Image (cartoon, grey):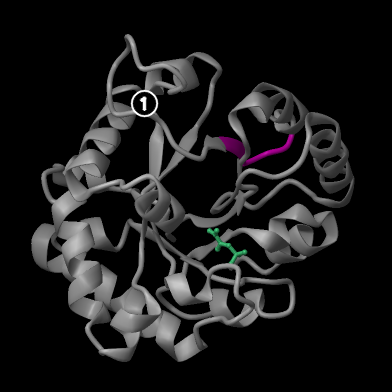
Amino acid sequence: MRKQIAAANWKMNLTLQEAEILIDELMDITHDLKENQKAVFAVPFPFLISVKNKIVDKKNFFVAGQNCYDKKAGAYTGEVSAEMLKSIVVDYVILGHSERREYFNESHPMLAAKINICLENGLKPIFCCGESLAIREAETQNSYVETQLKESLFHLSAEQLTGFVIAYEPIWAIGTGKTASNEQAQEMHAHIRNVMTNQYGAVVSESISILYGGSVKANNAKDIFGQPDVDGGLVGGASLVAAEFAAILNSLK
Ligand code: PEP
């Protein structure tokens, strides 16, 4: 069975003290996960070591960076490298979140380079894709997402894509309280898997975990995660409330 993943994206929220209270609370109310399940915490860089230390004893709990730079090292003031993340035992890195594409002009080639440097350092990317409301209304979301996948992933080998993680996040559903319907989510996830099957074959595409992101909450997670091609979620707002995220973890297949 594909890995089922609930990934928390804390974005630029909380102080260290607040972050520690949240993670302590969550550790108190969560159990070890099943073999096929994972919890991933994409927390701000300054909190990574502290959060990692607090989750280390729980089975299948991991930390993630929310980004990393595409260069190895050097005079890039303010940036964080893949090697630095590896050195503090980070497991995953979110790449291509729509907020980074929009506010930091992250392009397809830049994301391809970031994916490469993460893989070289043994970090697992969580590659985000998804369309705006205008694209959805024009009904061109399938080709739009296909281009995102082709431009940033298709240079990878079948081996590199085996067990890869993709997050489909319709921009119109992020932080809006408006979730894609179960049918819309399943339709796009099946499309993504189909795109990957056409390029890499069914064995690879069936191994890829495709997470849904966009206003996932405790009260809708079970239905969305229940769709056949949905393998969990990338969760923003609801991941900042321990009871909400614990319930989302309990909703994994
Ligand atoms: C996100 O930022 O990845 C996200 C899905 O946010 P939210 O759950 O708040 O919509």
Residue bounds of the magenta highlight: 58-63
Q: Is residue 154 left or right of residue 168?
A: left
Q: Tell me the quadrant of ligand 1.
A: bottom right
* Secondary structure of the residue carrying numbered label 1: loop
In which quadrant is the N terminus drawn?
bottom left
Residue found 54% across the figure and 21% down from its top: 89
Q: Is residue 18 left or right of residue 78?
A: right
Q: Is residue 31 above or below residue 252?
A: above
In which quadrant is the C terminus drawn?
bottom right
Residue found 67% across the figure and 69% down from its top: 251
- Image position, residue 25 (x, y; %): 88, 45
- Image position, residue 152 (x, y; %): 20, 49
Q: Can the viewer see residue 161?
A: yes
Front position in the image: 110 or 30: 110
Front position in the image: 74 or 241: 74
Q: Quadrant of residue 196?
A: bottom left
| Residue at mark 1 | 122
- Image position, residue 34 (x, y; %): 64, 52
Q: Can the viewer see residue 203?
A: no
Residue found 15% across the figure and 43% down from its top: 156
Q: Based on the picture, tell me whether residue 189 belongs to the magenta stretch.
A: no
Q: Quadrant of residue 147?
A: bottom left
- Image position, residue 92 (x, y; %): 47, 37
- Asked if the beta carbon under badge 1 is closer than 8 A to the nearest atom of ligand 1, the reply is no
Q: Is residue 144 above or below residue 21?
A: below
Q: Is residue 136 left or right of residue 178?
A: left
Front position in the image: 250 or 24: 24
The amino acid sitting under disc 1 is: Gly
Q: Is residue 252 left or right of residue 187?
A: right
Q: Residues within 10 Å of mark 1 (few under 14, many from 20)?
A: some
Residue found 78% across the figure and 30% down from its top: 16
